[in-house]
Image (cartoon, helix red, strand yellow):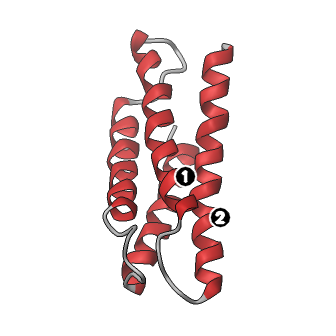
């Protein structure tokens, strides 16, 4: 992997850590709301995910399936929308919050297990 891809991958993982870590920290406070770590983690995930997918369209042997990239994009955009449009609320519905966490974990599972 060239340095740009490695940097994007590193930042993508940082975004995941911010999103999941921020949601766990927020859950432990007892007040379910979208914190800054969650919002910025979602933004970083979408932007770096697009960057990681874009240069792969050359048809290389290690190119992930287009369907996998599409599923990850849809899940990432759902997470972003759920975080962005709820960011100013003092508290979000428990189901909404847990769905956001579940989608975050599902997106990581797609990345790891879909070959």
Q: Residue at x 53, y 44 (%)?
A: 111
In the figure, residue 3 lies in which quadrant? Answer: top right
* CA neighbours of label 1 inside 10 A, class few (<14), some (14 to 19), many (20+): some
- In front: label 2 or label 1: 2
Q: Horizontally, is 21 left or right of 65 in the view?
A: right
The N terminus - image quarter: top right
| Picture layout, residue 84 above or below residue 31 | above
78, 62: nearer the viewer: 78
Res. 1 in view: no
Q: Residue at x 33, y 39 (%)?
A: 70
Q: Residue at x 34, y 50 (%)?
A: 77
Residue 24 is situated, as x and y percent measured from the top left of the image, at 63, 73
Mark toward the start of the polypeptide (2 vs 1) = 2
Q: Give the total of numbered labels.
A: 2
Residue 97 is situated, as x and y percent measured from the top left of the image, at 44, 76
Residue 32 is situated, as x and y percent measured from the top left of the image, at 49, 82
Residue 88 is situated, as x and y percent measured from the top left of the image, at 38, 71
Could you give the CA–CA distance between mark 2 and mark 1, rounded to whole angstroms? 14 Å
* CA neighbours of label 2 inside 10 A, class few (<14), some (14 to 19), many (20+): some
Element carrying mark 2? helix
Q: Residue at x 65, y 74 (%)?
A: 25
In the figure, residue 65 lies in which quadrant? Answer: top left
Q: Which residue is mark 2?
A: 21
Res. 92 in view: yes
Element carrying mark 1? helix
| Picture layout, residue 34 above or below residue 42 | below
Q: Which residue is mark 1?
A: 108
Q: Horizontally, is 96 left or right of 43 in the view?
A: left
């Amino acid at each position: 992997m060239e340095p740009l891809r490695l940097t994007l991958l590193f930042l993508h993982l940082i975004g995941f850590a911010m999103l999941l870590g921020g949601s766990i920290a927020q859950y432990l406070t007892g007040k379910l709301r979208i914190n800054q770590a969650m919002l910025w983690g979602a933004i970083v995930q979408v932007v770096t995910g697009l960057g990681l997918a874009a240069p792969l369209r050359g048809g290389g042997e290690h190119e992930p399936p287009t369907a996998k990239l599409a599923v990850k994009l849809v899940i990432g955009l759902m997470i972003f929308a759920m975080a962005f449009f709820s960011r100013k609320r003092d508290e979000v519905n428990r189901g909404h919050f847990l769905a956001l966490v579940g989608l975050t974990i599902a997106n990581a599972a797609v990345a790891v297990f879909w070959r």
